[in-house]
Image (spheres, rainbow, N blue to C red):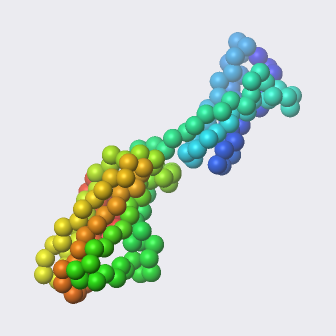
Amino acid sequence: GGDAFVADLTGPVPERVHLIDMDDGTYAGTYMCRWAGDLSFNVYLAGTAVADSPYRFLVRPGPTLAQNCECTLVKMPMSRLVAIAGTACSFTIFAKDKFGNQRDEGGDEFTVKCRGPMSIVQAFITDNKDGTYLVEFMCTQEGEYFIDVKRERIDIMQ
């Protein structure tokens, strides 16, 4: 022990690595990856890369967190979608993890309710298997419709 090793992670956003000298010739390191993507783990001793450093690996997004999911509807001015009665309408849900990373696989359950002036319009959700979900519905009468999007009973948009 006692050597001055330095380590870091490089990728979408650089991350610090905290190294601990175990006083037995080994070192332990801790870090938290907040960003999904290709990363490189770099280890240096006296400014020189150690062994096969950098070590490359892929960090995938974590589980979906409802509070971080987004809909294309929210990105529109005043969250309004203009639809024409009798014409199919759609928007996209983007599943995100705790750190806001776009999920790269499907399997999440979302519920969508579209309430119109006289009734609830059925919405159809297609899992694109890439962390996005296509929502399609058709308004049958003129008037204002309100759309609620939820995951695990938590509002994504209302």
Asked whether residue 27 appears in the rendered view, the answer is: yes
Horizontal and vertical percent for residue 20?
68, 26
Asked whether residue 4 appears in the rendered view, the answer is: no
Pick whichever, 131 or 13, lies toward us.
Answer: 131
Give the residue at the far front of this rendering: 87
Q: Would you place residue 61 above or below residue 126 in this image?
A: above
Q: In which quarter of the image is the C terminus?
A: bottom left
In screen coordinates, is 45 left or right of 95?
Answer: right
Q: Would you place residue 19 above or below residue 70 in this image?
A: above
Give the residue at the far top of this rendering: 24
Q: Would you place residue 121 above or below residue 35 in this image?
A: below
Total marks in image: 0
Q: Would you place residue 28 above or below residue 76 in this image?
A: above
In screen coordinates, is 50 left or right of 151?
Answer: right
Horizontal and vertical percent for residue 28?
65, 24
Which residue is pictured at 68% across the width and 30% down the height? 55
Q: Quadrant of the N terminus?
A: top right
Horizontal and vertical percent for residue 39?
64, 39
Which residue is pictured at 86% across the width and 32% down the height? 47
Give the residue at the far bottom of this rendering: 142
Pick whichever, 99 or 146, lies toward us.
Answer: 146
Give the residue at the far left of this rendering: 118
Answer with the quarter of the image where residue 9 lies.
Answer: top right
Horizontal and vertical percent for residue 75?
45, 72
Pick whichever, 49 or 20, lies toward us.
Answer: 49
